[in-house]
Amino acid sequence: MEPGNINFHTRKWVRPEDLNANGTLFGGSLLRWIDEEATIYAILQMGNGRVVTKLMSEINFVSSAQQGDLIEMGLRATKFGTTSLTMQAEVRNMITRSSILTIERIVFVNLDEHGRPAPHGYTEVTYDRDRLPKHHLPAGPPQPWPAAAPAA
């Protein structure tokens, strides 16, 4: 992984509920955070709220985090396919900058309204402006809540 090419945007505070039996950060919690961060990044790069994780390559747990540590997650797009986006990920200690985890490849697939792979139409990363998903934007003015059914 090339250092310095990843943008670190999201930060997490390691809390007691994030720990494993050894008292260090539980890998499952960390992977959940990475998958969520990568999903948001894929949505904003492909401009579609319908994306799925297709593949995560080897996950390298380099070091651990302790309760109270501040960590930051970074992603970098490495390739746009016709229907996919590939990225790299790194998690590091925010204070010491020491690496906690690296993932060389995470692949997301863009889906149509029927759940099938669909072209996203992009070939490069956007840095200036996010590509907001159109189907998640409101179609018109907010609708009132339905009236409650009368009590029987």
Image (spheres, rainbow, N blue to C red):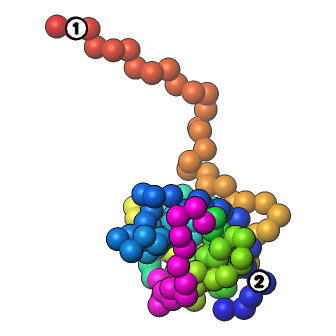
> Which region of the structure is painted magenta?
56-69
The question of residue 60 being in magenta is answered with: yes
Q: Magenta stretch mostly in which secondary structure? A: loop
Q: Secondary structure at mark 2?
A: loop
Which residue in the rendered view is the most extreme toward the left?
152
Marks 1 & 2, CB-CB < 8 Å contact: no
Q: Secondary structure at mark 1?
A: loop
The residue located at (50%, 85%) in the rendering is 61
Q: Which residue is mark 1?
A: 151
The question of residue 23 being in magenta is answered with: no
Can you say which quadrant of the picture contains the C terminus? top left
Distance, label 1 to label 2, CA atoms, is 61 Å
Q: Is residue 113 above or below residue 148?
A: below
Q: Amino acid at mark 1?
A: Ala
Percent position of residue 116, x then y: 41, 70
Can residue 116 be spotted in the picture? no
The residue located at (47%, 90%) in the rendering is 58
Task: Please name whichever residue, 58 or 133, is drawn nearer the observer in this view of the structure.
Answer: 58
Q: Is residue 136 above or below residue 25?
A: above
Percent position of residue 135, x then y: 56, 50
* Quadrant position of residue 88: bottom right
Which residue in the rendered view is the most extreme toward the right?
128
